[in-house]
Image (cartoon, helix red, strand yellow):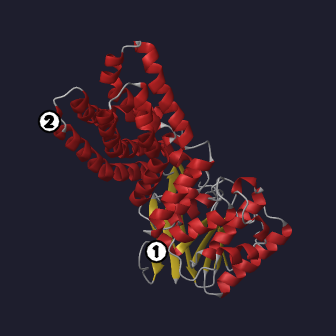
Amino acid sequence: MRLTGSGLASERGGRLIFEDVGFDLSDGELLAITGPNGAGKSTLLRIVAGLLPATEGRVAATPETDGPLNTFMHYLGHRDGLKAALTVRENLDFWQKTADSDGGIAPLDALERVRLLHAVDMPAAYLSAGMRRRVAIARLLVVRRPIWLLDEPTSALDARSEGELGELIAGHLAGGGLVLAATHLKLPVPITKSLVLGNAA
Amino acid sequence: MKAFLAIVRQTITVSFRSGGGPLVGLIFFLSVVIVVPFGVGPDLNLLSRIGPAIIWIGALLATLLGLDRLFQDDRDDGSLDQLQMAGLPLEFVVLAKAAGHWIATGLPLVIAAPVFGLFLNLSTAAMGVLVLTLLVGTPALTLIGVIGGALMVAIRRGGMLVAVLVLPFAIPVLIFGVLAVSAIVVGPADSFGLPFMLLCATTLLAIVVGPVAGAGAIRAGRE
C-alpha cells in the first residue's frame, strides 16, 4: 500500500496553519513529522485520519482502498479514547467490537505486551497518564490496521515503555505497515522519511 | 449490528456507573410530580384531570437530563475520534447512543410512571394508557434531544442550553401524548386513536431525523 498526501493546506480560525504540504509513503516506511508548537503536526494527522477536512489538497491510497480510507488507519491522539467509568478490559473489548477487526490479537495478549495485565479489571479512571497511553497503544494491537497515525506517541511514557513502543513500531513496519508520527521528541525507532512543518510564512 | 449493540451497551454502562444514571432522572421526575399537588391543592378531581399532563411534562424534563454530556464526554475523552475511525457511519453512532440513553433514562421513567400516577389520583385505565403513550413517545423525546446533545460538541457549553434548544421541538410529542391520555381520562374515548397515531408517527419521524441531524451537527462541529 502506498499513501500520498498532496497540496495539503489547513486554515483554522482564520489562520493559515500550513500550505502545500505533501508526503509519499510506502510499505514499511515511517514518516516523522516535526516542527515547533503550533506548526500543525496534530492538525496534519487529523486531516490524514479524516477527522478534519483539509482546506485544500487530498490524501489518497494506491491501490484504491475498498471502503473509507480511515478504516485502514489507527489514530493515537492526545486524548486516549478511554472511558473512565469502564475497566481496561471493557475498553479494549469495546474497540474490538466497534471496529471490524480481522487478525487483531486478543485484548489480554495485547495488555501483556504493554505490561498492564495486572490492571485489566481496573476502571480507566484510576490509571496514570502513562498507563492510559499504554492501553491506547494496546488498541493498535487488538484491531489490526496497516496505517498508524501517532501523535506524540512517547508522551507520558517511561524509558522502558518507550523502548517497547519502539519495538512495536518496528514490528509493524517490518510487517509492511505504514507509520506517520508527529513528535518533537526523539523517536525510539529509525526514521525513514521526515517532514518538517514550519510556521506558515 | 455487533458494533451497534456494543455502543448501546457502553452508553448504558457508562450512564449507570457515572453519576447514578437512571436514579437521578427518576428522582427528578418524582420531584416534579410531587411538587404539583402541593401547588394546586388537594383537589382530587382536578389532580386526576391534569395528572397525565404533569407526568408527561415531568418525563419530558427528566429525559433532557444528561443529554448535554452525551456527546461532549465522548469528545473530551477522545472516544468520538475513535468511533469515527472505526468506520461506522456517524448517523449509526448517534442512533446507537440515543438507544442506549433511552434505555438508561427513558425506560425507567416509563416503568415508574404508574407509581407516580398514584400521587395524582389516576384511574387504572388511565395509567395503562399513560404507560403506553410514554413508551411510544419518550423515544421521540430522546431522539429530538440527541440533536441538541450533538450540537453541544461544537458549542462546548452545557446545562440548560440543551433544554432551551430542544423543548420547543418536543411540544408536538407532549400535545399528542397528553391528548391521547385525556381521551381516556376525560373522554370521549373514541378520540384516543388520532392523537395516539400522530404520536407514533412523530416517533417514527424522529427515528429518521434525529440521527441524521445529530450526525450533521457533529460533523459541522469538527475542528
At horizontal 41% and vertical 63% (from top left) the residue drawn is: B89
Image-based side of B33 in relation to A177, left or right: left
Mark 1 belongs to chain: A
Mark 2 vs mark 1: same chain? no
**Disc 2: which residue:** B190
Q: Is residue A32 left or right of residue B170?
A: right
Q: Tell me the quadrant of the picture where the N terminus of chain B can be found.
A: bottom left
Tell me the kind of residue under disc 1: Ala
For label 1, the crowd category at 10 Å Cα-Cα, with few meaning under 14, some 14 to 19 and many 20 or more, is some
Residue at point 25% right, 46% down? B200
Q: CA distance from mark 2 to mark 1?
A: 62 Å
Image x and y of residue B138, in percent: 37, 42
Q: Give whichever of A197, A98 is nearer the camera.
A: A98
Q: Is residue A138 above or below residue B90?
A: below
Name the element at disc 2.
helix
The answer to whether any part of residue B83 appears in the image is yes
Q: Secondary structure at mark 1?
A: strand
